[in-house]
Amino acid sequence: MFSPYFVVQALWLFLPAYVANMAPVFLAKIFPKWDAPIDGGRARGDGTRLLGDGKTWRGLIGGAVVAALVALLQSFRPWDLVTDFGRASWGSILAPLAIGFMFGLGALVGDAVKSYFKRKSGRPRGAPWIGPDQLDFVVGGLLFAFLTGLLLGAIDPSFQWAETWFVHMWWIPPTLIVVTPLLHWLVNVIGYWLGLKEVPW
Ligand code: CTP
Ligand code: MG
């Protein structure tokens, strides 16, 4: 039976990727000079950029590092063994650091891949693209973390993190795909009410 508790678990699991997805905007304010774009300024034949100046190495790497720290902090406050990012079961902080980093890196690689197709489809930097804009980092983050979990499981078969969250608890990824756009919308509406945003989307 579906339970609201699954949503709480899913949000806890994906928190490093949510933070990674928001981190680049703040990192851009803190380190304005580290603005080297991932595409190195390269453009297509028609002059449009491959990714654009909105996708920097600072955002990509910085976001992944922040996500690793978030997962590490979370791993010390688990309420059961599935929510500890593998720390207790493996007896090492390596698992939360590796999985958290890859949640963040995957989220931001997903975001950059989205920008590639966004530019290709003629949408300029910052233009909205409903759907891909909300789900790019969910797909990327889940994929990278799942593969990292499988890799750690191949090194030590007692490490069952990927199987637990993605096979045994197969409903977790679909839950995130449904809940994330709703959450995104809610955050924007609240931001608009508080006067932090000009428009409610
Ligand atoms: N950012 C960054 N590096 C990244 C991702 C984001 O530095 N890898 C920063 C940029 O300053 C960017 C801002 O975070 O402008 C907001 O991110 P996002 O909305 O993803 O980028 P956009 O500028 O809207 O570009 P796009 O249209 O390609 O999504
Ligand atoms: Mg944008």
Image (tube, rainbow, N blue to C red):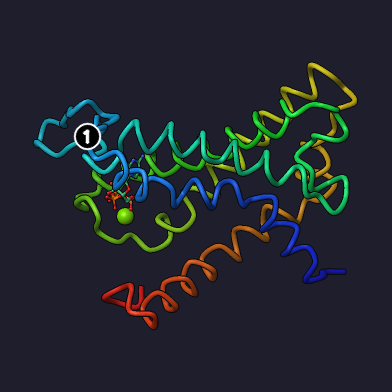
How far across and how far down the image is residue 35, in percent?
24, 34
How far across and how far down the image is residue 71, in percent?
66, 42
Q: Residue at x 86, y 35 (%)?
A: 88
Q: Which residue is mark 1?
A: 33
**Residue 173 horizontal side relative to residue 200, left or right:** right
Q: Compared to 153, does 120 lie above or below?
A: below
Quadrant in which the N terminus is drawn: bottom right
Query: Which of 22 and 161 lies nearest the eye of the viewer?
Result: 22
Quadrant in which the C terminus is drawn: bottom left
| Quadrant hosting residue 157 | top right
**Residue 56 horizontal side relative to residue 165, left or right:** left
How far across and how far down the image is residue 117, in percent?
32, 43
Q: Amino acid at mark 1?
A: Lys
Query: Which of 88 and 10 lies nearest the eye of the viewer?
Result: 88
Label 1 beta carbon less than 8 Å to ligand 1 = no
Q: Compared to 46, does 138 lie above or below?
A: below
Q: Residue at x 72, y 22 (%)?
A: 151
Return the residue found at the far top. 155
Q: Secondary structure at mark 1?
A: loop
